[in-house]
Image (tube, rainbow, N blue to C red):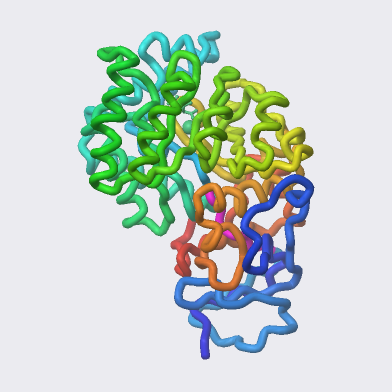
Amino acid sequence: MSWDILITHIKGLVQVREPGTEIVAGDAMATLPILPNAYLAIKDGVIADYGNMDALLVHHAQHTLDASGRFVFPSFVDSHTHLVFAASREEEFVMKIKGASYADIAAKGGGILNSAHKLQQLSEDELFERTRKRADEIIATGTGAVEIKSGYGLTVKDELKMLRVARRIGRETPLTVKTTFLGAHAIPKAYTHEDYVSLVIREMIPAVAEEKLADYIDVFCEQGFFTMEETEMIVEAGKRFGMRPRIHANQLHRSGGVQVGVKTRAISVDHLENIGDEEISLLQNSGVMPTALPGAAFFLNLPFPPARAMLQAGLPLAIASDYNPGSAPSGNMPLMIALACIRMKLTPEEAINAATINTAAALELQGTHGSITRGKVANVFISKPVPSVAHLPYAFGSPFVEQVILQGKIMSAI
Ligand SMILES: N=CN[C@@H](CCC(=O)O)C(=O)O
Ligand SMILES: [Zn+2]
């Protein structure tokens, strides 16, 4: 008997859970189970065993890694990204510094329409190569599973192109990928609202379903983008083709996105910079995962979601990066955890739960990802030598991840 990989002398094995814990909510988010002086054994791509070093019986392994002074974490699950895009938009970043708002830029044909224009010029292969670099980047900062949305195509052909690229990231990198169709991300200049919504429902959704390109359907429910009624029509159309909703809700205004999410039984409502008591009560016992995107709130100088009030109401909370060129040009999950602690007053334990076990549930990956549990996919990383888990958000922006293992394979030096 021999392990494929044995990690020994782990200072703390983080997020150790027995099978069955699929989500943490309210007060339970404050507890992050950590096993001190531990080992972790990996075989055939899964977590085969773990325990205290004193209980380690089988020492033989193809690769043995000594993690003295280091923590081992389950890889982050990033449940909201726009990883497939053509190019960065730092020109808009500078406009914002000089006073323009996100909405001003969007109204002038910038923003999402700017990204769509750039993406429409690229071949599928070129788009894949650009996206693969971002995939490597997020792997290096500890992400093991990721949701990727379309929404910068805005034509049937280009939305399909984006989703094919996203699926290919899932096949050709060690990331676990879930895909979301977000044709209703913005309204191209040549269309009326009505005509574009009809294109999304009548042509895009069936074409996406035909190639089985999307697991979920999303809509940017926001003033100047899609109304509550349009959002409901679009997600109901997606549901008829087996795509479960997740919604861009309440980013810039009290847009009603949470109300539509609850009504349509969305798996998650994401952003939530503009919610109040009414939305919090609606989310209670709804089964919808509230998801904060602290990178976007930080980058756009928006209010941060009222995380403490949500936890006090007994809600679960997930944290994702929203990696995209317009409102969150970073997929660095340790940085998102730091922002959640610093700006949303989450404790490190709460923020790490939000970025692992709860994001796994938000992608329906709770059986395979998001915790150190026997039988789950061996997606883990070894930290740099650090004094404590709280060092992660404390030393914000400092590299935290030293060695990545995905699907039971040691990734080359990062
Ligand atoms: N808000 C809508 N979509 C993205 C931003 C897209 C963009 O500006 O390119 C978001 O989640 O923040
Ligand atoms: Zn987004």
Nearer to the camera, 34 or 367: 367
Residue 310: name its quadrant.
Answer: top right
Q: Is residue 72 magenta?
A: yes
Residue occupying the point 55% across, 53% down: 360
Nearer to the camera, 216 or 117: 216
Q: Left or right: 408 with respect to 258?
A: left
Residue occupying the point 57% across, 60% down: 381
Up/down of 272 relative to 22, above or below: above
Magenta span: chief secondary structure: strand
Q: Residue furthest bottom?
A: 1
Counting every numbered tag in the picture gives 0
Up/down of 161 relative to 222, above or below: below
Q: Left or right: 168 with respect to 216?
A: left
Nearer to the camera, 209 or 167: 209
Q: Is residue 2 magenta?
A: no
Whole-percent x, y for residue 157 in the image: 21, 33
Nearer to the camera, 37 or 17: 17
Residue occupying the point 76% across, 69% down: 36
Residue 105: name its quadrant.
Answer: top left
Whole-percent x, y for residue 61 in the image: 53, 83
Q: Left or right: 402 with respect to 232?
A: right
Up/down of 324 relative to 386, above or below: above
Residue occupying the point 41% across, 59% down: 174
Q: Which residues are magenta?
A: 70-77
Let me know if residue 169 appears in the view: yes
Whole-percent x, y for residue 160 in the image: 26, 38
Let me know if residue 133 appears in the view: no
Residue 340: name its quadrant.
Answer: top right
